[in-house]
Every structure is written in structure tokens, then in C-alpha cells.
Amino acid sequence: MKKLSIFVAGFFLLIIYTSEVYANTKGSFLSMGTGARALGMGSAFCAVADDADAVYWNPAGLAFLSKPEITGLHINLWEDTLYDSLNYAHPINGIGTFGVGVIRLSTDEIEKRESPLDAATTFSDTQTAFFLTYGKNIYKTVFGGINLKAINQKIDNYSDSGWGMDIGLLWNVNANFSTGINLQNALAPTLKLKIVEEKYPLNAKVGVAYHLFNVLPRHNNKITLAIDVDKTEGFTTKQHYGLEYWIENRFALRGGYREDNLTGGLGVRYRNFQCDYAFAPHELGETHRFSFTARFGFSLEEKGRKVQQKEQKKKRIKAKKYYKEGEEKAKAGSYQEAVDIWKKEAFPWARMGGDEKLESKIKKSIEGAEKEINKEKQARFFSKGMRFIQEGECLKAYRKFKQVLKINPLYKDAILQVAEAKKRIFEAVSPGGKARLHFEEGLNSYATGRYNTTIKEWKKALALEPELKELNNYIEKVKQERERLIPTPVRLGDRHYQNKEYLQAIKEWEQALAFNPESEAIKKRIIQARKKIRYLTQRQLARGKKEVKAKNMNKALEKFLSVLKMEPENQEAKKYISLIRKKLKKTKKQKQDISKSVTASQQEKPQKTDVLLKQAEDYYFQYRYEKAIEILEQILKVEPTNKQAQSFLERVRKVKGK
């Protein structure tokens, strides 16, 4: 008798749940859906799903979200029956969107009797579904999603739980048309309350949606027409039709048709909050459904911009730090160290941080420091030259005075001393005819440090006039000087290599090789450094190309500039740098033009703001969101309190994120 009473009570519940709305099948409580917005559209939401309720309607739709979002629904049904849902979605840049959700249907105070004469007792029936969802853009305009869900049912003293999985796909065919599919119970949960094991049937939802923009001129409005086909395993196919009309992205009117019933609804959106209402008639009574949605935090675009700004700020701080370090060195008279710091550290960081003022300041500081360095060199070379003259080392003196003239070609004292040293050298050697020409060529080469050429030319002169004994002495002096200088550039090159300054290392080693062309050890060093540069440049080029594809132009520019630092003549890096700078310059110019337009509109004709707003509106409906955002941001720079521009900008950012 007890079993029979429970069966009768259960049958009464079954009559309620197996109406045309819920479908007579295990897990039918899930067929009600979530969110008053979707229910007001006749549950035709599979290809529309673009909010947190996508956790239920199509997990792929979560990928459209740009901000964290939460939405809740509460419905009072019949016979003390409550239906609740709560969904939360959280997008993570570069990874996808994660979501969690819960749906609960419960009926309390259900009477049961052991026999007709016994006093009635009560029990409850509760069905709960928990969702763990993930959605991501998987290929261009194709989005995918997956739901892992846990189902629990408790009726009187019996309960059981099961696990299942849903799979969703959503494809934005173009700006107006989208289609989606959601396979619910692709991995079906199985529950066994007492004896009979029941498996949830596969449910397939296939939908299409068509979006119309700017139907009414000069008004921000959008119409969505949606159709879903819903097929549950073992049951007939159902069709759902829905319509949604947004006015100024603030007010929504909705209508729908499902299972021989008309549905309707309203929506109101204010900033990050949205309230939706849906009405659906039923043979057991009319139902009124309300849901509330809240969006919070920064959008993915805003987060990306903040991360980029934070990175640039760090770079600017580094640039300023190195600039001050260089200033301290300059004040202490260490001008060369100051120039090295400014060139190698401060200037690259300032450029990567986009600090143009500091770039200009560093350039001027470098110019000033290099002038001081040249003054010091000039004085030092001239002093050495005079000392060599006094010691009778005319050849060395000649080279030092020529170095002074390289720094300052108009230095009169150096010009006179060069002439005097040259005169004494020719008097000592006394070459004549063709030998004189070779001797002078060798002397000029010696002045610029080309010792091998000097020796070669002087040997030619000696071949023409073997009696020039003093020339033999000069050749030996140059050889000794060359041998003495070789270890210095080799040592410097090794130091640069250890500091990963491969280009500077090669320059030093090439200078050493000029002194001793037969050195195999130096040649090996140069080959090794060139291989290292090639490997690093290829790696940085690949990284730069990757950033270009991701449209991170500043990061890409940073990578390609680092290539030129190692390989100044790399044509591929130069090509990319040129293209990126043109693009960045164009973007900057567009911003400046917009800023000028907005400023002019405020000073001359305030009504021009309306024209700019219209331009932003046109860009919005052409899906050129970036341009719309640029114009609106510039308007707000001039008119920070312009509420229309503020709300429009917020709306564009939301839509762009989705």
C-alpha cells in the first residue's frame, strides 16, 4: 500500500511535468531552459547565445563574452513548485571563457498515505543540475564549447546522482547570420532511484539567427530573428521561433512561439545591469518569469590595453632610470660610460615605452656628451703627438695629429704639426719617383690604422729603391706596432661575446684580423659569433611575426628592432619595421585628426558633435568597432560629461568584446 501511495503521488507530479512545455521524459526539468530573455523568444536561442545563459543554451556562446557576467532566474510554478537557475561566466584573455551554472526544480508538501484511512504525511521532490562550462574561439568565426554536468534527484527517501556532458558549436557565417548546434546529453547521465535505472535521452538543438542593424535611420537599433529545431531521442521534433528588438541598446521587446503557445518579453539594460521579463501561457496557468544579469570588471579589450599600458610604463621607468644613471656618469666626467648607457639602455627602453620626449632628451644628451668626448680625445691626441715630436718619433706623431684632424678638421695647430711631421718623415726616408707615391700611400694608410696596406705599399717603394734603408726601419716599426695592438681587440671581442654583444665582438675581431689576416683562431671566433647572431635573429623574427598575427604591433616592433640591434642590415626586419611604423603612424594620425575635428567642433560649431556621433554610429553598424571607439574617446576628451557618448562607448566596447 505504501508503494502504491508513493506511486500515485509521483504520477501526480508526472502529470505536471509531462505537459507540452516540459516533454514527457527523464530530465524534462532541463527543457525549461534558463533566462527570461531566451524564454521570451520562444526558447529559440541556440544560435543567439551571447550571455551567461549560454551555459545552458549553447556552451560555445560563452566565447563571445568580454566581461565576467552573472545571471539568475526565479519562477513560481504550480502546486508549490519552484524553478531557479543561476549562471556565471568569466572570460580569460587568450584562454577562453569558463562558466558555472545550476538549475533546480523542487516541489514540497506532496502528500502521501499508507492507506486511505491513514493520516497524510508529506515528502518533497528535488531535481538539481550543476554545470561546469568552457567556450572558446576555435577557428576564425567558429566557436566551440563543452559542458560537464552533474545531475541529482531526490524524491522522498530515495536519491541518486549521475554525470553527463553537452557539446556546442556556433558559427558566425557573416555579420548578419549565425548558426549553432547544441548536443545535450551527448554523454548521458544515468540515475537509479531504487530499482529501475533511467538514462537521460540525447537532445539536439539546431538553430539559425539573422541580425538586422539600423533598421530605423539615425537610431541605434537591432532586430534578431531566430529559429530553433529541438529533437529529443524518442520524441517528436519541436520548433521554436523568436524575435528580439533592441532600441538604443537599452530597451528590448521580445516575442516567440513554441509548442502551440505564444511567448513574450521585455528587457531593460542600464550600464552593466540588465533585467528581463518573460510571459508564457500554459494549460495549468500563466507563468511570469524574471531574470537579472550583471556584468562587472574590465572587458578583455580593456584588460589588454591596461596590460600594454602597464608594460609601457615599466619600460618608461627603466628608460628614466638608465637616463639618470647616464647623467650621473656625465656629471662625474665619465662621458663615454654615459653615452654607452644612453645608447644601449635608456634610448631603446624609451622607444619601446613610447616616450618620445625622453627619446629627444636622450639624443641631445648623447650629442652633448660626444662633443665632450671629442674634446678630450682631441686634447689627448694632440698632447701625445707633441710628445712624439719631441722624442723624434715623427711617424707616431704624424698619426696622432691626423687623428686630431679627423675629430676637428679646422684645428690649425694640428694642421701645422701634420705638415711638420710629414716633412721630417720625407726628409728621413727621401723617396723619389714612383717610390715616393707608394710611400705617401702607405703613410696615409698608417694614419688610419691600416697597417697591412702600409707595409704592402712601403715594400713596393723599397722594391723600386732598395737603397732606402730608413724605410726598412719604418716597416719594422709598423710591424711591431701592429703586433702590439692585436691582443687588445681580441680581448675586447672576447669580452663583448661574453656579454652577448655579438656584433661588437665581430667588429673587434675583424680589426684584429686586419692586423693578422692569417690567424685561424680569430676567424673561428668570427664564424661562431655570426652563427649565434643568425640563430637569435631568426628566433626574434619568428616571435615578431607571431606578434604581428596577434595584432600586438608594439611588441612586434620591439622584436624586429632587437633583430636590427644584432644584424643592422637584416632586410626582413627592416621591411616589417617600416610596415608597422606606417600603421602606427596612420593610427596616430587618425587619432590626431579626430582630436582636431572634435576640438574644432567645440570651438566653432558645437553641433558638429552630433555629426561625429553619427559617424561613430555608422562605423558601429558597419562593424568597424575600433573606429567608432576612437571617435567616441576623442569626443569624451573634449566633452567628458557627454552622457550620450559615454553610454555609446560602453555599448560599442561590449559588442566588440562579444
Image: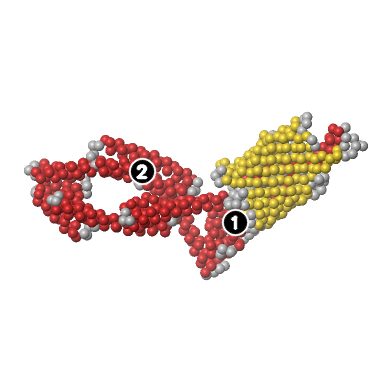
- Which quadrant is home to the N terminus? top right
Residue at x 25% of width, y 41% of height? 487
Which quarter of the picture shows residue 455?
top left
**Residue picked out by circle 2:** 499
Name the foreground residue: 151 vs 109: 109
Q: Amino acid at mark 2?
A: Asn
Tell me: residue 352, above or below residue 498.
below
Residue at x 70% of width, y 48% of height? 72
Q: Residue furthest bottom?
A: 604
SS class, disc 1? helix
Q: Residue furthest front?
A: 332
Residue at x 29% of width, y 57% of height? 372
SS class, disc 2? loop
Which quarter of the picture shows residue 375?
bottom left
Q: Is residue 416 left or right of residue 189?
A: left
User: Looking at the image, can residue 334 be seen?
Assistant: yes
Q: Amino acid at mark 1?
A: Glu
- Closer to viewer: mark 2 or mark 1: 2
Residue 100: percent from the left, percent from the top? 65, 43
Residue 364: percent from the left, percent from the top? 35, 59
Name the foreground residue: 476 vs 620: 476
Disc on the earlier residue, 2 or 1: 2
Tell me: residue 517, above or below residue 247.
above
Residue 552: percent from the left, percent from the top? 49, 48
Mark 1 surroundings: few (<14), some (14-19) or many (≥20) residues within 10 A: some
Residue at x 84% of width, y 38% of height? 9
Q: Are marks 2 and 1 in contact (CB under 8 Å)?
A: no
Name the foreground residue: 568 vs 494: 494
**Residue picked out by circle 1:** 650
Residue 6: percent from the left, percent from the top? 84, 35
Q: Residue furthest right?
A: 117
Mark 2 surroundings: few (<14), some (14-19) or many (≥20) residues within 10 A: few
